[in-house]
Image (spheres, grey):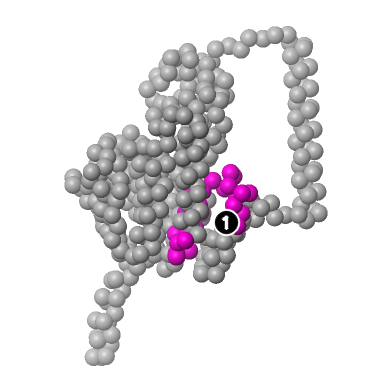
Amino acid sequence: MKHLLLFLCLSIPAMAFSAYKIEGKVNMKGEWQNQIYLATIDKLDDYFSANAEFVINVAEIDKDGNFKFEGDILPDRFQFYRIYLLKEEHSEFNACLYEGGEEHNFIHIILNNHSQLKITADASTYAPFGDYLVEGDAQNHLMKKLTSMVYPSYLFYEIRFPSELKYSQDKLMKDLFVFSDTCSNALVSLAAINNTDYDRYFTYNTEAYESIGNQMKKEQPDHPYTRDFQRKLRYYADDGFSESNWLFKGLALLFGLSTFILGYLYVKLRKKKQGPKLEPVPNVDHSVKSLTPQELKILAHIQNGKSNKEIASELYIEVSTVKSHINKLYGKLKVKNRSEAIRAKETLGL
């Protein structure tokens, strides 16, 4: 009996320590909600995804900006998580909306169920986190260093000349590749690579992507991120040269081309029968106050002829998030497509 009591007494502190705890302090200089969110990133493709379903913990922020997350539900493996705030104007359904410029509202960290971290915002900055300080393990010091590189990219909107913007973005990409190559932690290296533009740089720097892939296979062979990253490598390398794959691609291309031609001929014949027809002005909802700042930005990009992918790049959000915003503003303006949205914008003088 004595041995059992001794075992329990020794075990209770150890069990209590197994829970994670994140304490911190943020700047509340803008119109922010008094809550802060902790969201899991289970897949690499969700590193910048906006989805309220990823939230695993919510903490209150006191009048001085202090907060604390506690719990014991995290996996024992280390992975990425996001801490972020929301503006007062947003609801829980807008969770994870990214604010740009001086209102940069999120950071990425690495946690497991035993992590003990303290995060303190730089009080001299306007953003909720700014050039924050982190106390805890070495890998989150490296994540902070990575954030210090990536954060200025959210100020790219202040650059006036297209060439200057391109050179600034190219420099950031080069810095990220160097950081990933010299970083001693596989997960932090992966985070750096995940901040690069795969579409633009994979072909020119394939070795850098393959290098972190090999590092993850060596150090984290069973991690879900390792499988995710290998799939991304295969996708961007177009690693599918089997005969059946090429046959499928050929048939899909032929079907798409045939559909386009038939559709084009159908439209031409219909116009010829009906004669010229003026499009009516869409029935615009004049209560445009319901449009959020993010929707107004996207509407301006639509008027400038930007694609969804280009808008996502400009605003540093996912393409799926852009589509969601566009669907919402279509509903508010009572329009069906981009041309009607542009006409509505011009009609209302937005």
Q: Identify the magenta region.
A: 182-207
Which one is nearer the viewer's eye here, 245 or 157?
157
Visible residue check, residue 42? no
Q: Does residue 205 appear left or right of residue 315 in this picture?
A: right
Which one is nearer the viewer's eye here, 149 or 221?
149
Give, as a three-letter code, the residue at label 1. Answer: Tyr
Tell me the residue at 27%/36% (across/down).
Answer: 31
Residue labelled with disc 1: 209
Q: Quadrant of residue 139?
A: bottom left
Q: Residue 172: x and y, percent?
A: 46, 46
Tell me the residue at 50%/59% (across/down).
Answer: 181
| Above or below 122: residue 114 | below
Q: Residue 131: x and y, percent?
A: 30, 48
Which one is nearer the viewer's eye here, 91 or 157?
157
Q: Residue 20: x and y, percent?
A: 32, 64
Which quadrant is the N terminus positioned in?
bottom left
